[in-house]
Amino acid sequence: MRRILPGPHLPAFVISLIIAVFGALFVASYSIAMGDPHAHAVPIGVVGDASDKERLRGAIDAATGARFEAVDVDSRDAAVEAIGQQRLYGALLMGEDHAELLISSASGASMARIIGQDTTAIEASLGTRLTVLDLHPLSQKDPAGLVLFYMALASTIIGFVGAIQTRVNAGGLTLAGELGWDATRAVLAGLLISVTVGPALGLERFPVLWVWAVLAATMFIVGAVYSIFRILFGNSWGLLPTWVLFVLISNPSSGGVVAPELLPSFYEFMGRWLPTGATVRALRDLTYFPDAIHAEPYLVLGCWLLGAPILFVLLRRRRFGTGPSRAPNRERSTTNPESAGTPDTGNPDATEAR
């Protein structure tokens, strides 16, 4: 192979193959996760007396098959509360002369659309008029419900891209310097994203301080994870596992574009425990459900925020110490033939600096 591709052409060829494969994996992952969403046993409340509930349950089964699961709810107020706490995606009620369908677009725009697609079939099955009420509508400037996902996506990508660029362009930082600038970058970028989406453009209305904290935590986590992979796999390959974890898996499984209950089982499971999914859920609660904040996304982010930097510090101290990274001696490398082709294996920034 080296005879066919001498010198730098062989690694260039290998990189080309890897990029081609990862491009195909990117399309495959996002298409499998989000290309054809299917509901499976999504809880929908039914409200009424015993005969009404049986009728409503039959209408749901006839119209949707196994996609939705009818859950008995005592009253309309109880259904509204359950939807507000995101325990139900909707509820079907039987009135005197018509039926009512309660939905929540903010809980998942994709889910609300799927539920809405079945209204005609449900109405026909019930044989009565059906009205639809959206209890938690999306922002008028975000009718597709994607802005919160874009915020989480930006935090993820900026998290590792910022970490890469800092280490490439600011070689020689101490361990404290690396952590300090990772935190500074996360705080600054999180603030600008929050202010841009909220007060500046008015795309969403949310508590800027709390959203800022969530975005900053996400960026710091992703930067720390990249730093771990960089130490484990080296400067040249540290980006690949980071890209797999966050771009191939975490982003499509986040529930930001397609509701978790519509994702394949693997993505639905991973989305609960990876940073992007936790960020999307935290942002959704802060924006649309401030009175029903869930603890799980904050616990997930907290575990990552605690575990990733600690592991990075331990690996960094063990392999390179806590002092500044020693810059490569360019003059020696260019003038001494014996050292020209020898990389500085003790310096984590040497390869990137070259």
Image (cartoon, rainbow, N blue to C red):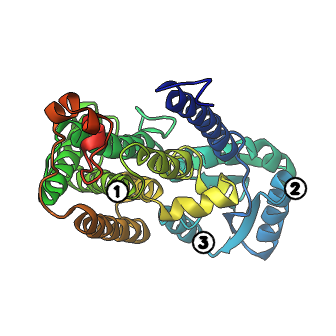
In which quadrant of the rendered image does the N terminus lie? top right
Instruction: Give the amino acid type for the residue marked by disc 3 in the picture.
Output: Ser
Residue 296 picture quarter:
bottom left
* Left or right position of 6 against 296: right
Picture disc at residue 75: 3
Instruction: Give the amino acid type for the residue marked by disc 1 in the picture.
Output: Ile
- Viewer-closest of 169 and 334: 334
| Element assignment for label 3 | loop
Q: Earlier in the sequence, mark 1 or mark 2?
A: 2
Q: Earlier in the sequence, mark 3 or mark 2?
A: 2
The residue at which mark 1 appears reads as 231
Residue 224 picture quarter:
bottom left
* Left or right position of 117 against 286: right
In which quadrant of the rendered image does the C terminus lie? top left
| Element assignment for label 2 | helix
Could you tell me which residue is drawn at 42 percent across and 54 percent down?
A: 233
Give neighbour class at mark 3: few <14, some 14-19, many 20+ (Cα, 10 Å). Answer: some
The residue at which mark 2 appears reads as 62
| Numbered disc in front, either 3 or 1 | 1
* Left or right position of 251 against 282: right
Q: Position of residue 283 (x, y in %)?
A: 37, 53
Task: Look at the picture and state if 86 lies above or below 115.
Answer: below
Picture disc at residue 24: none
Q: Position of residue 227 (x, y in %)?
A: 32, 54
Check contact, mark 3 vs mark 1: CB within 8 A. no
Give neighbour class at mark 2: few <14, some 14-19, many 20+ (Cα, 10 Å). Answer: some
Q: Position of residue 38 (x, y in %)?
A: 73, 50
